[in-house]
Amino acid sequence: MAEAMAEYVHKRIRSELGFASEDAREIDKLIKQNYHGARYSFGYPACPNLADQRNLLELLGADRIGITMSEGDQLHPEQSTSAIVVHHPQARYFTV
């Protein structure tokens, strides 16, 4: 559910910035990132270290809305997610 909502929010951001019309319409092209920008989530290849999101949460003041991290680097409440969204047209997924 959290991943689906993150993709929905990313689509909304692209739409609000005027990029959504450039998105591919076919699911196989969307899976191959045939759209403007990228969304990097912690725990995936581009940002493998979950502990790194502590800096993001502090920068955004996530505690104001009740989002915290456990000692095991898990977000609470349980269905929370975080990401870094980049809208440069050449942004692509990569592995660290």
Image: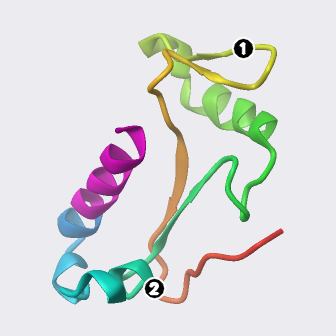
Q: Is residue 10 left or right of residue 92?
A: left
Residue that numbered label 2 is attached to: 32
Above or below, 53 against 19 in this view is above
What's the residue at 38%, 88% (across, down)? 34
Q: What numbered label is drawn on residue 70?
A: 1
The image quadrant of residue 23 is bottom left
For the record, the magenta segment spans: 1-13
Q: Nearer the viewer, residue 63 or 26?
A: 26
Rendered-image quadrant of the N terminus: top left
SS of the residue under disc 2: loop
Mark 2 closeness class: few <14, some 14–19, many ≥20 residues within 10 Å: few
Rendered-image quadrant of the C terminus: bottom right
What's the residue at 73%, 34% (across, down)? 55
Question: Which badge, 2 or 1, is on the more N-terminal residue?
Answer: 2
The image quadrant of residue 79 is top left
Does the magenta run of residues contain 41? no
Above or below, 4 against 77 in this view is below
Residue kind at label 1, given as amino acid type: Ser
Q: Nearer the viewer, residue 68 or 58?
A: 68
CA–CA distance between discs 2 and 1? 33 Å
